[in-house]
Amino acid sequence: MTSGYAGPSVFGYETDALRRVASISVHTSPLAALGGKDAGGMNVYIRELSCHLAQLGLPVDIFTRRTDPLAPETVQICEGVNLVNITAGPATPLNKNDLFHYLPEFASQAALYSVKQGVRYDVVHAHYWLSGWAAQLLKRYWDTPFVQMFHTTAEMKNAVSPAKFHETTKRAHTERLLVDLCDSLIAANPDERAHLIWHQHSKSNKVCTIPPGVDLELFRPLDRMNSRLSLGMGVDEKIVLFVGRIDPIKGIDTLLYAAEVLARQPEPPTFVIIGGDLDETSLPVGPLADVAQSVTERGIASCFKFLGSQPQNQLPFYYAAADVVAIPSLYESFGLVAVEAMACGTPVVASRSGGLRFTVEDGLNGFLVPVGDQRLARSLGKVLGDEQLQRRLSIGAMNSAQRFAWPSVASQILRVYQRLADGFRGDLCCEDEIFA
């Protein structure tokens, strides 16, 4: 597949025109099934940002590591956006912690692709620390400024995770190097920006706070009863929805404790879990099987439905069907699920952590509770038991989601790219940042 790029193909040829961007996501493809291992909000972010940038006239090539030997070299995700599968190491899924030593091969093969296609990139946008290291290796070939977005950092994740789930020292050390090596940093919320400046010692004038966006055409209010009927849910059921990867940082234990409390009510709610994997008989496997076993041991299995990963275009129906969405995460850099739910008019009860503190407004579109606190059950019960409160929070949720529309977010990212392409290495941020 040719790119149709009309600019110069000679590396090092400088121009202030912003004609094409390379986006790098080494360890996970934007086309991976959501809710599975290493496939969550970041995948949605990369895909949606790229397609909205293309709508603004900026083509994007997304580079990811090949995990299937039969996958084509390029796949068009949307008009103006190509996914490029780069062979680096065996063409099979690998643990992300085993990928670092394949990054030099990844970079050289990405550079070879650009030569074969006769394209050059004016900005590189790296997602996650592995992609950041690939981006700085690509500088020897492309001599192009790069934007780094960590999505989560080892230091912030380790601060809230049990020791056995801590990120590697290699990751933490590499992230610290990347803060200095990159030309711009995108922080998803003000806390992350402060962390990058005060703890990672980034220059403040290259850190921009720009949250991810939400597709307001896909995630929109739908009729609750019709949604429930289409999904085979009871019209009168009280439904608590959880959407996300099955990962300790998502606060699953806190959710199960809340379910134990609410299961003692005369009309206990149903907890619908979207995420994780099911086998061919629709039984949970892997980490989701551990959750199912814990639910059984607690005597609340009758209150749970495990649906595994679901296509993104089905999520609005689940959000609309739910009375409330629970997000008990120990840490979230943004909280995409919260904004998707709010766009559908569904109240949210979330941990007061990371970006959730800036997306969920306590008492307006949902409730915030302390991380790992039993007040999650109390707040969920409050929403479930008060239809008037649900309606008020629903209206607030729909209004709150509007500021995260993708066209606005993509425009801000585009301006950062343009200033980098123009040669600026400071004062990169927009004056009308969403969290300003």
Image (cartoon, grey):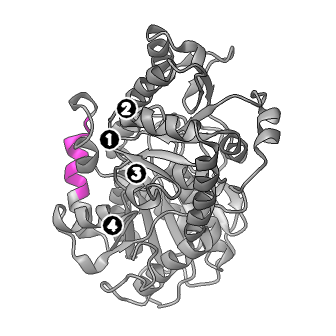
> In terms of sequence position, does the residue under pointer 4 or pointer 2 come before the other?
4
Q: Which residues are magenta?
A: 166-175
The alpha-carbon separation of the residues under discs 3 and 1 comes to: 41 Å
- Location of residue 57 in the rendering, given as x and y in whole percent from the top left corner: 65, 80
Look at the image and tell me in which quarter the N terminus lies: bottom right
Relative horizontal placement of residue 351, taking residue 426 as reference (left or right) = right
Give residue 105's mark: 3
> What amino acid is found at the position of numbered circle 2 in the picture?
Pro
Question: In the picture shown, does residue 150 fall above or below 145?
Answer: above
> Does residue 170 belong to the magenta stretch?
yes
Give residue 248's mark: 2
For marks 1 and 4, give the one nearer the viewer: 1
> What amino acid is found at the position of numbered circle 4 in the picture?
Pro
> In terms of sequence position, does the residue under pointer 3 or pointer 1 come before the other?
3
- Location of residue 114 in the rendering, given as x and y in whole percent from the top left corner: 54, 67
| Residue shown at 44% from the left, 28% from the top | 258
